[in-house]
Amino acid sequence: MDSIQQLFKSFGLAMVGTMHPRMLWLSLRPFLIVSVLWGCLIWLTWTPALEMLSIFLTTSVFTSWIQDGLIWAGFENARAWIAPLFFVMMLIPLISISLLVFIAFTTVPTIVKVVTRQHAYKDLERKKGGGLFGSFLYTLWSALICLALVMLTLPVWWIPPLVAVLPPLLWGWLTMRLMSYDVLAQHATSEERDALLHQHRWPLLTMGIVSGMLGAVP
């Protein structure tokens, strides 16, 4: 019961803080920067990437069955749009992971500084249990694990129920990992951070999954 009360209290404080103009800008800035960077990259690589992917999908024994199955099911023009669809499905995880990593490095530390200036956190002690190098290694390792899980599960994303379940789960897990570390890096020792993550792992995972689901809403 105490955990639920703490969760709602934290949510209320977060909602109040989010309405501040600076917090709104910090929330929107990563999306704008990542959108511009990926937009330029996609614009430069779209045509050659589709050509390479189309050749791979046609000649590979691992993927040619997908096109044959779609044609057998009545999608006669499958060869025309299967490569763009594959390309977009490969881009979505990469964009999502890069966005979370960018937020963890550039936005979370600033937000933590803003939040800790609130009266409710005036007695919070800075124990500096994590640093930039530790955050980099932790972020890199977590992103690689998530990317490996995405590559392993990507074939079943074609199944309609799973495409709405797997991405939020993966983004929720990665969000929990990255944000928990960076939020606690300056205000907890490494032992305290590990204990808190273990003690509150399910509420943190739930918050991450909810965030992932909200991110999946069009």
Image: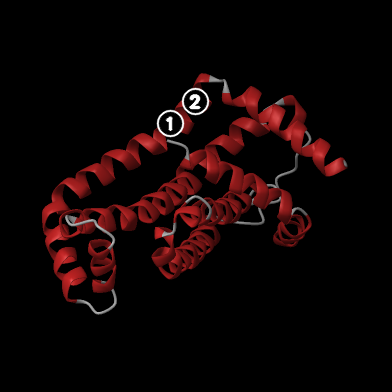
For residue 144, the mark is none
Determine whether 148 is above or below 162 in the image.
below
Residue 29 position by quadrant: top left
Its colouring scheme is secondary structure
- Taking the spot 53% from the left edge, 50% from the top edge, the residue there is 168
Rendered-image quadrant of the N terminus: top right
Name the side, left or right, on which 124 lies relative to 65. right
Q: Amino acid at mark 1?
A: Leu
- Crowd band around label 1 with a 10 angstrom C-alpha radius: few (<14), some (14–19), many (20+): few
- Taking the spot 44% from the left edge, 59% from the top edge, the residue there is 159
Determine whether 115 is above or below 202 in the image.
above
- Crowd band around label 2 with a 10 angstrom C-alpha radius: few (<14), some (14–19), many (20+): few
Give coordinates of residue 201: x percent, y percent: 72, 56
- Asked whether disc 2 touches disc 1, contact meaning CB atoms under 8 Å apart, the reply is yes
Give coordinates of residue 137: x percent, y percent: 50, 64
Name the side, left or right, on which 86 lies relative to 181. left
For the residue pair 39 and 79, the one nearer the viewer reads as 79
Local SS, label 2 = helix
Numbered label tally:
2
Q: From mark 2 to mark 1, how far is it between C-alphas?
A: 6 Å
Give coordinates of residue 173: x percent, y percent: 58, 56
* Any part of residue 122 in sight: no
Q: Amino acid at mark 2?
A: Leu
For residue 28, the mark is 1
Rendered-image quadrant of the C terminus: top left
For residue 24, the mark is 2
Local SS, label 1 = helix
Residue furthest out toward the bottom: 61
- Taking the spot 58% from the left edge, 26% from the top edge, the residue there is 18
Determine whether 78 is above or below 29 in the image.
below
Determine whether 52 is above or below 199 in the image.
below
